[in-house]
Image (cartoon, rainbow, N blue to C red):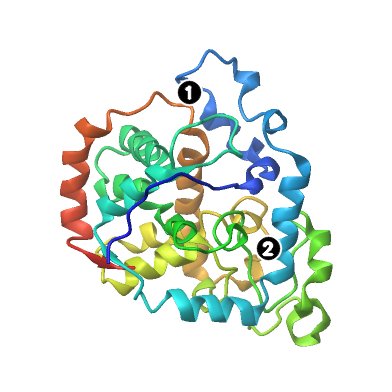
Amino acid sequence: MRPLATESVVILDPSQIHRPEENYKEYNDFIVSRTDKSDNDFRNFNVNLQTDVVYNTYALMHKNQTLDFVKRKAEKWCRLNKHKMTILEAVHLLDALIDESDPDTDLPNSVHAFQTAERIRADHPDEDWFHLTGLIHDLGKVMALWGEPQYCVVGDTFPVGCRFSQEIVFPETFKANPDTQVPEYSSKYGIYKPNCGLENVKMSWGHDEYMYHVLTGNNCKLPKEALYMIRFHSFYPWHCSGDYDYLCNDEDKEMLKWVKEFNKYDLYSKSDAVPDVKALTPYYEELIAKYCPGELCW
């Protein structure tokens, strides 16, 4: 069954207000804005995002995303038995997603997909797989169109089954999480071994993890760098604050540079001029046919 997007669904991503983006400021100096705002006007989240909305979304996430909860969500979604559709159909399904928590854009998530891809394409013209990664990185947000609550779709991600980092936004809200009362889950390493590798760590459930499983479950041909970018682009406590390195193995540490490289485009492409989606579509159709052809199971 192919779902039809008949109405807009608001996706609130409150993590944006607390992201330590000073680390990426150097990459934002060359933005060509589609608005008349000055540089100082960008990313002013106070203009349209209420603090209580931010706090309550994260409070729900941090209360509910236990190890058992994540296992249940993975069992539900990783069967990939909800729908069948192509990558491009999924992109256009995001026409119905307007992120009203973002003060820099009132455009659908599908437009942000092309903005991110085109910003990457400009800087990395010879890495076509990277262009496609930019296009598809947020496609896991289709879960919100299929009934998943927002705290299971958007926001920064984090490991479960071990101590919750103080580098996660609103860390005090984890006191309501039942796992904090389980000694095995609340120690530094929890259920994991030192340097076990992120592939062996259970992450909070969201669009990153879901899209990673869609790609691997359908045997898509993207390189491991792309898979890392998609799976961990919201793992801000790691790639921006440097926490959880003690769970990482050598491959994770090598891939970190790619996750950081991706994030500078994801963060700062939303104010770019609106791409000509119709004109760009044939190019991305070729990339989709090369790396993720045909209908995928979702």
From the viewer's perspective, is residue 200 above or below residue 259? below
- In this rendering, position of residue 28 left or right of residue 124: right
Instruction: Tell me the amino acid under the disc marked 1.
Output: Ile
Quarter location, residue 272: top left
Which residue lies at the image location 18% right of the left edge and 47% below the top edge? 285
Q: Assign the C terminus to one quadrant of the image.
A: bottom left
From the viewer's perspective, is residue 54 above or below residue 156? above
Circle 1 residues within 10 Å: few <14, some 14–19, many ≥20: some
Instruction: Tell me the amino acid under the disc marked 2.
Output: Met
- In this rendering, position of residue 234 left or right of residue 243: left
Percent from the top left, x then y, of residue 284? 22, 44
Percent from the top left, x then y, of residue 106? 50, 31
Tag 1 secondary structure: loop
Q: Assign the N terminus to one quadrant of the image.
A: bottom left
Which residue lies at the image location 62% right of the left edge and 55% below the top edge? 156
Q: Nearer the viewer, mark 1 or mark 2?
A: 2
Q: Which residue is mark 2?
A: 61
User: Looking at the image, which is closer to me, 139 or 187?
Assistant: 139
Quarter location, residue 188: bottom right
Q: Which residue is mark 1?
A: 31
